[in-house]
Image (spheres, helix red, strand yellow):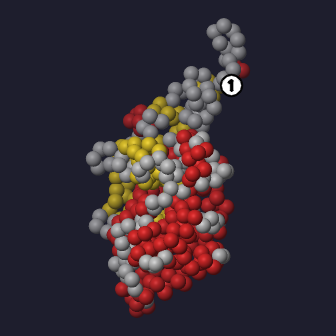
Amino acid sequence: MLRDDEGWQREFDAWLKPFLAAWRHRTRQRWAPVYLRGLLAPGERKSIEPLAARVSPANAQQLHHFIAVSRWDTSELEQVLFEKADGLVGGADAHLIVDDTAQLKKGKYSVGVAHQYCGQVGKNANCQALVSLTLARDEVPVPIVLQLYLPESWAKDQKRRDAAGVPGDIVFRPKWKIALDEIKRVIESGVRFGDVLADAGYGACSEFRQGLTRLGLTWAVGISPDQHVYGLSVQVRSARKRLHSNGRPRTRPSVSLQPRSAKQMIDNEGAFETVMWRRGTKRALQADFAAVRVRAADGHEVIGHRHGPGEEVWLVCERRAGGEKKYYFANHAADAALRVIAANIKARWSCEQAHQQLKEELGLDHFEGRSWTGLTHHTLMTMISFSFLQHLRLRENKAAARPSSAPAFAARHSAATGSATRRA
């Protein structure tokens, strides 16, 4: 959040110009900056009425109409956000991080609300789930996609769809499919990144991993310790060369090796070594890692097993200080250094920092309306606000490196983005 000061206000006006051009309509161009300033300004609640009370007390109804009723298209604004984010942190060394974040909600008529897993409380709860994409580089995250996950129960309930204004072309898609479709859109928009990172909620899905590979992307994703893998020496025997015991030809191929779980493969063949992936402000960040080259058991069905060998990948195990182990697949080249793979895996945490700041400082989960339109508009506005904060932060970092040329407003507002800097 930012204090009320002319310095950031002037910077904000200049930074917002391409967004205003994308809004096109004069009335929307008037109320958009007001709403954004309300999100950026201090205040515990960022729902319409308390927000309006702080920045435009006589115009709560106009702000409500702008966010929850007016049906302005988000596509051009999203393109501007993509371009802003790419300019801030995009590049060959950037990461595109896939995750989701949940928002606790009561009742059953707020769009997408269902009893489902909520990371905020660590168990199933009544909540909305948003699939997120975050562009990050050098521990600086910029969220660029927050797409509502519409549970199947909602997608099939026409009465609730109509009441919440869910567009007719919105159908049920699992989270991994939403993420993959959004990644394609981000690529088409010209956003630059070097790899895709995701936790086991996405990485455990073979369709998601295979989709990333088909897009020609480098990726590192979490998996379950029970994920099956094959050794590299596995061979697939043609079905035509084997017969059943009754003499009939087999209709499926077979394999020369039995698959093992990721845990078994690491226990039997992995050798741990201490890897430092980054030097923090107080100490080196390091953990024990082991890596084995394997073939994921996500290929075509074979005799005796649901899946035969698929893509050749790195199976990576991280052993943390307390003894906890985490498992990952990474499709990096066979000669990739373990330090590089480990650094990429650990870069995923920055999206969690972004989600926390979106909620605590910009009111991502404060929207009180029930409609698809209102929630979609509000989430986009919080991402635009966040990208402006990161714009200030990076500008201040550059100014700190050149003290003689530091702009006055940067010094006055170092505290404004300090919480993000400290967490990073």
What residue appears at the point 37 percent right and 64 percent down from the top-left corner? 360
Point out the image quarter for the C terminus. Answer: bottom left
The kind of secondary structure element at disc 1 is loop
- Which residue is denoted by mark 1 in the rendering? 238
Q: Is residue 364 left or right of residue 274?
A: right
Q: Position of residue 49 (x, y in %)?
A: 43, 69
Quick one: 184 or 150, which is closer to the camera? Answer: 150
**Quadrant into which the N terminus falls:** bottom left
Q: Which residue does the image show at 71% across and 15% down from the upper left?
A: 249
Circle 1: is it few (<14), some (14-19), or many (20+) Cα within 10 Å? some
In this view, 308 is above or below 246: below
Q: How many marks?
A: 1
User: Which residue: 37% across, 75% down?
Assistant: 42
The residue lying toward the viewer, choosing from 140 and 352, is 352
Of all residues shown, which one is farthest toward the top?
246
- Residue 131 at what x, y percent from top left? 52, 53
Residue 96 is at least partly visible in this image: no
- Under mark 1, the amino acid is Ser
The foreground one among 16 and 224 is 16
**Quick check: 226 above or below 175?**
above
Residue found at the far bottom of this picture: 404
- Residue 165 percent coordinates (x, y): 60, 54
The residue under the point 34% across, 78% down is 415
Residue 322 makes an appearance in the image: yes
The reply, left or right, for residue 403 in relation to residue 237 is left
Which quadrant of the view contains residue 117? Answer: top left
- Quarter of the image where one finds residue 352: bottom left
Q: Position of residue 369 (x, y in %)?
A: 49, 59
